[in-house]
Image: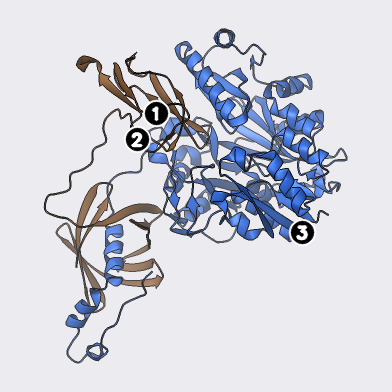
Chain colours: A blue, B brown
Amino acid sequence: MFEKVLIANRGEIAVRIIKACQEMGIKTVAVYSDVDKKALHVQLADEGINLGDPTPIESYLNISKIIKSAQDVGADAIHPGYGFLAENPDFAQACKSKGIKFIGPSPDVISLMGDKIAAKKTMEQAGVPVIPGYHGAKQDNASLVNEGKKIGFPLLVKAAAGGGGKGMRIVHSEDVLEESIESAKRESKSSFGNDTVFLEKYIDKPRHIEFQILADEHGNTIHLFERECSIQRRHQKIIEETPSPVMTPKLREEMGNAAVKAAKTAGYYNAGTVEFMIDGDLNFYFMEMNTRLQVEHPITEMTTGIDLAKWQLKIANGMKLTLKQEDLIQRGHAIECRIYAENPSNGFLPSIGTLERVEAPTGPNVRDDTGIYAGMEVTPYYDPMLSKLVVSSENREESINKMIWALSRYVVLGVTTNIPFLQKVLSHKEFKAGNITTHFIDNYFKDWTIAKEGLPIAAIVSLAVYDSMHSITQETVRYKESDPHSPWKHVGRWRMGVEE
Amino acid sequence: MFINYECENHVYNVSVERRKDHYFITYDNAEYKVEAEEIKSGHLKIKLGDRIIKSVITKGKEDKFVFVDGDVFKVKNVELTGARKTKKKKKEGTLDSPISGKVVNVKVKKGDKVKKGDVLMIIEAMKMEYIIRAPYDGKVKKVNFKEKDQIEIEQNTVELTKEEEA
């Protein structure tokens, strides 16, 4: 097994991977930018290397600095986490040429799947269904507008190199098509350094359902069932669950086979995810393959009992899969909520500041994958996700109730979070009924704001009691109030509680 | 003691007094008699009639945060001096930046005529784009930022003279 692994990431996923390495007796190296000096992943790792400037391109996206760091500390493998360099073929190639094992698929596969157009063509040829659209090379505005008109509205403008909703626009009418294409190109350029876009038919009542893949480097490929990720805001997932409420054993088998076929066609190894779109009639279409560990991987771990992060390490180390497709089972139901520092009442704008208090809920089958602690600064440099709360139960209804309970006991003070919003979504009757699509948030929570009825009496009473307990003037009040025989009369100055 | 709490531009006048084992809180002409204990630092357990309130309070640099029943409120202790605090009202169709970030595109220059809904400026933060649109027809009086400038939250992006005033 590897002796020392460098984790080229930050936040909760770096923490997750460090813990997996520690369990397996592997030494860990964290990298961090100047603003992350005190971050949790740095605290947990055996060694830490400062990458300098917090701008991603100078730190977590800087291939040469990261490779040099790995060489300096003698790391024999690099785990890229998700985001940043996880799906960058140049990075995987750079690792390979320096003799450092990249924990993920080969650079060629990352390259193929990173080019969404080439990926779709490959899948279409392999007989995996894809969505109608324009994936051509003509990228001037006039050609794209023309192709867009042919496909019809609504349509989707997507960054060829994209993911996570970056560089993606829905266009409902012709008059905003050109503006949307320009905007998607710009965002794609700044996020991925590539402004190629493609156009696609927009699917009615779409659900986002993806399949987890594990493949070893010896040709064995299995899927670990589906994850339903339809609840999204700004095209980013916020709530994921498994099994999908719409899944049938027959559909699961068909989609699972298609996912395995997609992975095998690409020559895929390590952990990966095949994303599908399902329409209202349960037709499924290949969307893309994510060549990395997904944010929402814990729900699969909760229902299958399989540790995906550890399998990534084992596979990268050359181990054969010991899991057989027919032996895998899904037990119960798991839900994940992504906790973001953002304000749902104000267009989900990120919220920054100091975390004054953080207390995560604990209980049976409650898992908190976190990268935060009290006293930490949330900076504007990186994705505003703070943690992932995951629960599992015997069935969907119990999981929903458990998640609502857990969220109501998740204390994050100092920045605005989406926790109250998540509770409202989970409590919505259409969510409970399983009637969800990727439009769910837009349909039911478009102009949602926290009910501004002011401070409830419970908050006012709490504040008043707190201030009374912690006030210096309190001692005189108490002294005057006490009866003439009270022992307090003789104790002199004293103070309630302890100053924070 | 008398305390004024400000939350969401609302001021709450509260008084609290401790007598023996009870706290008496007066707010909005009502008195609440409660029993309370701090079960651990910042965690309160309060008995109000037959209701049990469990809350968590933390002091930040300027604000206090109250967590109760899964909701969070940001509150400031304020001194009221003479005149009543005027409520800050959000300007309709504001041209202030909603976010701290980097200006990635400026679509207009001084003197340009714009129509309601036209894109004036695009700001990027946390890998997302925020578009500043003209809230009304008008003429650009001044553009306060250029491409690649850093912009802070609530800074004015573009000064726009309304059509009828232009």
Is residue A351 in view from this perspective? Answer: yes
* Residue A432, placed above or below residue A499: above
Instruction: Say which of A466 and B142 sits in front.
Output: B142
* Residue at the limit of the structure toward the right, as seen here: A218
In x, y percent, where is residue B130?
Answer: 44, 30
Q: Which of the chains bears the disc numbered 3?
A: A
In x, y percent, where is residue B154?
Answer: 34, 37
Judged left or right of residue A168, residue A73 is: right
**To which residue does mark 1 refer?**
B145
Q: Pointers 2 and 3 in contact (CB under 8 A)?
A: no
Q: Secondary structure at mark 3?
A: loop
**Same chain shared by disc 2 and disc 1:** yes
In x, y percent, where is residue A431?
Answer: 49, 39
Residue located at (51% from left, 37% from top) = B126
In x, y percent, where is residue A376?
Answer: 49, 56
**To which residue does mark 3 refer?**
A24
**To which residue does mark 2 refer?**
B155
Mark 2 or 1: in front is 1
Is residue B50 in view from this perspective? Answer: no
- Label ID, residue A337: none
The CA span between labels 2 and 1 is 10 Å
Residue located at (40% from left, 72% from top) = B39
* Residue A287, placed above or below residue A464: above
| Amino acid identity at mark 3 | Met
Dot 3, how many residues are within 10 Å of its Cα: few (below 14), some (14-19), or many (20+)?
A: some
